[in-house]
Amino acid sequence: VNGPIDIYKIFVCSFINVSILQFVFNMYALYVVGPQIENFYGKVKYLVLYFVIVLSGGLLNILFNSSILATSNCIPYGLIGALLYFGYHYRVYLDSVLKSQVLPIILINFVIGYFLIGPAAFGQIIMLIAGFLFARAVGVKYHSTKSSIVNGIIMSLILITFLLSMVFM
């Protein structure tokens, strides 16, 4: 990155949409996924997940673009990654929902993101993985062991440290 980075760019770029179509699909994704994540993880873990996803999405945006470009898809992708982690533990209950609602959201948002912002949309896949890692760090009630949570925290810290080092070095 050339020159100093305004810290606000890390957070602001995660809330900007480049088109009304992207905004509509992002809001739909948040409408479907947001309440589920809050219900599955609880309010505090949901807020932690949301904040870390916004932080890493902003860092990823600056890494790819070094300017404010819409990465608002990072939020739904990160939350969907958290939903996929939860779904891994509760496959019996969520298998049909994942196939009928979550996978179409992933595909639609990726296609729209790719055509609107180009190859930087591949960052959304990274956010899907990041959401999965962050969800592992906060754990799933009655299913996550302490070692799994510690591993999730370590992997999440490695990811954020990597993004920070790439952006600020």
Image: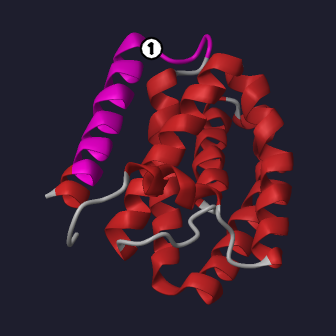
**Residue sitting at 43 percent across and 65 percent down?**
61
As for residue 28 lying within the magenta part, the answer is no
Magenta span has 149? yes
In the depicted structure, whether residue 152 falls above or below residue 83: above
Which residues fall within the magenta stretch?
Answer: 141-164
* Front residue of this view, candidates 167 and 111: 167
Q: Nearer the viewer, residue 83 or 165?
A: 165
Residue drawn at x 65%, y 49% as measured from the top left: 80
Q: Is residue 130 left or right of residue 44?
A: left
Q: Residue at x 46, y 67 (%)?
A: 123
Q: Is residue 87 left or right of residue 65?
A: right
Q: Is residue 55 above or below residue 27?
A: above
Q: Position of residue 29 (x, y in %)?
A: 79, 55
Q: Position of residue 45 (x, y in %)?
A: 60, 22
Residue at (61% x, 10% y) in the render: 142
Q: Quadrant of residue 154?
A: top left
Query: Considering the image in quadrants, where does the N terminus appear?
Result: bottom left
Residue 76 x, y percent position in the rendering: 67, 53
Q: Check disc 1 and report the residue beneath it.
A: 145
How many numbered marks are there? 1
Q: Quadrant of the C terminus?
A: bottom left
Q: Position of residue 24 (x, y in %)?
A: 85, 67
Amino acid type indicated by mark 1: Thr
The color scheme shown is secondary structure
Q: Nearer the viewer, residue 61 or 142?
A: 61
Q: Is residue 89 above or below residue 149?
A: below
Circle 1: element type: loop
Q: Going by the picture, which residue comes out furthest to the left?
A: 169
Q: Around disc 1, counting alpha carbons within 10 Å, would you say few (fewer than 14), some (14 to 19), or many (20 or more)?
A: few
Give the left or right position of residue 38, taking residue 86 as reference: right
